[in-house]
Structure formats: structure tokens, C-alpha cells
Amino acid sequence: MDQQQTEQQSERCAWWRGAALYQVYPRSFADGDGDGTGDLAGLRARLPYLAELGVDALWISPWYVSPLADGGYDIADYRDIDPAFGTLAEAELLIAEAHDAGLRIVVDLVPNHCSDRHPWFRAALAAGPGSPERAHFHFRPGLGEEGELPPNDWRSHFGGPAWQRVAEPDGRPGEWYLHLFAPEQPDWNWENPEVRAEFASVLRFWLDRGVDGFRIDVTDHLVKEAGLPDSAGHHGHPDPWRDQDGVHAVYRDWRAITDGYPGERMFVAELWETDPGRFCRYLRPDELHAAFNFALLRAPWAAEDYRQVIDATFAAHAPVGAPPTWVLSNHDTTRQVTRFGRADTGYGFDRARRHGLPVDLALGTRRARAAALLVLALPGGVYVYQGDELGLWEVESIPDELRQDPVWLRTGGADRGRDGCRVPLPWGGSRSPFGFGPEGSVPWLDVQPAAWKDLSVAAQSGTAGSQLELYRAALRLRRAHPCPDDSAVHWLPSPARVLDFTRSADFRCLVNFGPEPVPLPVDGEPLLASGALTDGPDGPLLPADTAVWLRPASRSAPASVSASASTWTAVPPNG
């Protein structure tokens, strides 16, 4: 076997192809020092919990120095840890301790924009028009007689224009700079070679400290169309501010860097591209390793929609040899229990945070449990957002004065923002802070529902039927039944509104999306179910909004798995 074949074989077996990763939003995970903010001390203390949960790696949302105008995605220093979270030395300890616990570390990288307090941007403001410092960003003169109008019609994703006018060093109104997100987040100019060299250096900085990979924020936004033309009347595809062909050269350069390090370092892309062909261009063998499959997150709770997304995902990934990466929620999206408990269960940014609509939390919980077994059964990688393993829902009752999301601020309250999925986790106890920090401390977002006392880690640990124990059992079983191929599933004939598939010879998954129970196959023995199976005249029944994992009756259960399906009963949320 030649070197190229050896490398291809090694990548086909790489850890990230079938890994389960857990997203840590540090500010809301665990507070180790009692100041109300989650930190590295809290995360380090909870590493045993994460190892016991059964995930393979952690994706840590930005922990860098930041004024927190956008929850840490406005970075002032890419090479240091924000003091609210700890120190660089603590981060290095965390990486080492996680590795000792069998957990890999993936850190967030935000290359499209930085903070307006980043030294390079502050230097650009001070240097004035036409300077090399301003060439690191997108500064342009305004339109109109006095330059009083933005340079083009681009809109910020957080609401309002995507341009901010600055006061020049002499105090006069001057140029405008581009910010596709908040004004505190100026976009980098990726046509500038010094910007490219800086980020290559940042990659090496963290790779040298042992991180196993990077999640790339807004992967397709870096390169803009030459001339920055208006979006209105733009007939080309893609939009002038995203998915430009030139972005692929950036990722080829980055891939060459990670390939030079030992230990299968990886990239995973945040990519909301809906065109499968353009989506998978990012996953070519010399570019990125994986990309979040948001199509499943967007899909309504319906068998035909889920099957269409699953089939289309495998078909799109096959030509580039990349594994799918399944995700149902993250720090930007409404929590699953709330989404699945609404009449309209689909998701999209045009209707993302529909606060105030009726939510059936018991129904949403049943569906979230079934969805968890479905995605954990699919070949490929899977991501779990912190708190999903506890069955937390979106906290919609946050007082306006406590909301911090720039989406809320920029839209004047029309979009109530993402704070509701970022509420600090409940670890134990019967009142705030529910073990998030020491007794008597006040969380940075002090809105944990009283009902969460029954959903805390302490309350659910060891409790048969709890969401936490369901996740623990599912992740153990997933490991015990490795998938030999991450390129497809094998569909079996099934009743309407039911999905039935195998991922290996000894592992089968059924999900009942319909309103009525359906019979279980007679040739399968339940391994795990998301809710209690019921008895029918001819054998067990799979209830509505329930999933079950089966093994062929002729095969014995793995010795390490002792749970039977009958122990897993749905636990409706309180309140």
C-alpha cells in the first residue's frame, strides 16, 4: 500500500468521522469561583461528568478575551483566555486533563470578524483612510453628497445596516466599515495577506497547545465579492457577501497546516448553505473535514421530511467521501423541547424565536427523546448541545432588562434573541443557582425556572427513565455498536409515518412519528427505547413520538449494556 492509500485508509478510520461531541457554552456551563459566570475551573471540575456521559470530544464555544458584545463571538485577543473564564495556563491544563479523561478538545474559531476592541481594529481607527491598518478590514467612503449613506445595501444578520460610520482622528464624520453582525464586530478583509498570515499563526498557536480541532464560525462569509456590489438586483449565486469561490483557498491553506500535526486534527464548519453541491465543496479531501448538517435541525417533525433530509445528506456527502455531521440544536437555536412542542415544529431564521406561541412541553420532551435516539443511530458524527441531555427547554420568560443578545437589541425587541437557550445549567439543589455555582452565588443570567430542580444532573442521575440516563445509555450503546460505514443507512419497509433502518448488521432503529402505536418487528429484541413500550394483542407496540433501538433476536447483547427497553419511561417536564 502506497503512502496516499495509507493516508486515505487512516482518514476513513479517523476519530471525528463517527464521534459524539458535546458543545460547551462556557459562560453557562459551570461556575467554579462563584462570580456568577461559568469558567474553566467549573468545566475542569465537570470533566468526569462529561466522560461518564459517553461523548468523545468537547466543542468549546469562544473562551477568548472579549467584551461580550455577542456572547464571546466578538474576540479582542485570539491567543488568550478571557479573565472571566480563567487563564491560558488553565486552558492548557484543561486540554491535558480532558485528554487524560479520554476526551478530545475542539475550540471555536471566529475568522469572519473580531471585536472592535481588537488591537488591529483600534489601530485602523487611529490610522485614518487609506492606511495599511484599515486594509485589514472593509473600510469604504459613504455614498451621498457628504458620504452620509452606507457604501451599499447590505444588511446585518442582527438587524439594521451592515455598515457603521466612524469619526476620523480629526473628529469629522468619515468612512464606514463593514460588520455583517453587530457594529462591535468588524469584518476582516480576507483579501489582505497579513490577515491570512495572522490566522495561520492563530491556528498553530492552539494546535501547539494540543487542541484536536476547530469549529469555524460562519464558514462561508470570509471572502466577499469584488467591489462589494449591492444585494438588491444581484442575480448571481451566491449572495455577494457569502460563499465566494475564493474562500476555498483559505481552507486549503488551513488544511495543509492541520495535516502537518499528529493526532488527526480536524475542522468542522458552521455552514447554513442549502445547495448540496455548494455545501459539499467545503468538504473536498483537501479542505474541511466535516460540516454541521442544519437541514435536519430545520426539518419539521415528520417521517417524510426526516427521511428526505437523511437521504439527501448521504447523497451529497458521498462524492467527496466526507461523513455527515448531525445536529439538532446549539447556542443559536431554540431548544428542541420547545420546538417540538409547538404546532409548527420546523425551524428557520425567519421564524426562529417565536416567543409566546403555545408549547406542549410533555409532547416536546417525548419528541426530543425520540429525536435523540434517531440522530445517535445515524452513521457519522453527532453534536449534543449542553442541556439537551437534561431535557431543558427554551426559557422564554426572561425579563427584557436581563436580555443581552445583540439580536434583541438590534431589532428593537422584534426578535427576542438567543438568551433563552443560554440559561445556566442546573446541576443540583432546589433553588437558584441549582448547583451552577456555589450556594448563594447569582448566575449571570439568573432566570433558571424553578421546575429545573427536577431536571438537574443530581435529580436525574441514577433515575430510571430520566433524559440524562437515556443519553448515557444511548451513547454507551452507540459505542458498543460501531458503524462499519458512514456513507448510508439501509431502509427497511415500514408503515406510514414510521422510519425503520439499520446502521449495521446488529443494530436497527425505528421511530414512530405518527399519532398511533405501531407493532414492533417480531425479529428484533429491544435494546433501548425513548419511552415505555406498550402491550398489544400480538406483541409490543411502539407508541407515538417514540424511538426504539433493536438487535436481531439471534444476536446476544453486548456484555457492557444491561439496560432493557422496559426501564425507559418518558418523564414529562414540570411546569
Image (spheres, helix red, strand yellow):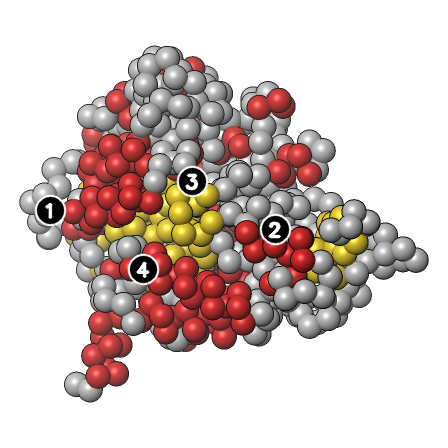
- Which amino acid type corresponds to the residue marked 2 in the rendered image? Arg
- Which amino acid type corresponds to the residue marked 1 in the rendered image? Ala
Which numbered marker is on residue 207? 4
Residue 557: horizontal and vertical position, in percent? 11, 46
Query: Could you tell me how far apart the alpha carbons at marks 4 and 2 are, in whole angstroms?
Result: 27 Å
Which numbered marker is on residue 82? 3
Which numbered marker is on residue 96? none
Neighbours of disc 1 within 10 Å: few (<14), some (14-19), many (20+): some
Neighbours of disc 3 within 10 Å: few (<14), some (14-19), many (20+): many
Residue occupied by mark 1: 557
Q: Earlier in the sequence, mark 3 or mark 1?
A: 3
Q: Earlier in the sequence, mark 2 or mark 3?
A: 3
Q: Earlier in the sequence, mark 1 or mark 4?
A: 4
Residue occupied by mark 2: 122
- Which amino acid type corresponds to the residue marked 3 in the rendered image? Asp
Q: Give the residue drawn at x 37%, y 13%.
A: 440
Q: Earlier in the sequence, mark 1 or mark 2?
A: 2
- Outermost residue, bottom side: 2
Q: Give the residue drawn at x 51%, y 47%.
A: 76
| Image vertical order of residue 356 relative to residue 266, above or below | above
